[in-house]
């Protein structure tokens, strides 16, 4: 396994239409590619996923979608997200 270090402070941004700021905040923190991990169909049906992706696109960021959020995910799902990011 490659060696790496992770520093992951948490900032919660909450409120009406804050999903439209996703791209700006990701870019602010130095992101170049974003893994958008979501659950079932409600994020798609509600339009939330489209709004987040539009914000990322507007900020000039690449993104990869991975559905299927589950509680306490197994390592295989994490590896799937990493694989998708590397391939796309």
Image: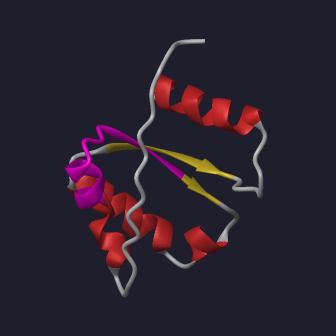
Residue 17 part of the magenta-drawn span = no
Q: Residue at x 38, y 69 (%)?
A: 51
Above or below residue 79? Residue 14 is below
Q: Residue at x 30, y 52 (%)?
A: 26
Q: Quadrant of residue 53?
A: bottom left
With 23 as the anchor, is 67 left or right in this view? right
x, y percentage for residue 21?
Answer: 28, 68
Q: Is residue 80 above or below residue 4?
A: below
Which of 22/10 is in front? 10
Q: Is residue 17 above or below residue 1?
A: below
| Residue 15 percent across, percent down from the top left | 38, 85
* Left or right of 76 in this view: 28: left
Q: Which residues are magenta?
A: 23-36
Residue 38 on image: x %, y %: 60, 59
In the image, farthest residue toward the top:
1
Residue 83 at what x, y percent from top left?
Answer: 58, 26
Residue at x-position 25% and y-position 42%: 30
Q: Is residue 64 left or right of residue 20?
A: right
């Amino acid at each position: 396994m490659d060696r790496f270090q992770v520093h992951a402070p948490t900032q919660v941004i909450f409120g009406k239409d804050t999903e439209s700021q996703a791209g700006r905040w990701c870019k602010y923190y130095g992101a170049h590619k974003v893994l958008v991990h979501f659950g079932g169909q409600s994020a798609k049906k509600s339009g939330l996923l489209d709004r987040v992706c539009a914000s990322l696109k507007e900020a000039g960021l690449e993104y990869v979608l991975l559905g299927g959020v589950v509680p306490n995910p197994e390592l295989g799902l994490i590896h799937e997200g990493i694989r998708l990011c590397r391939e796309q």
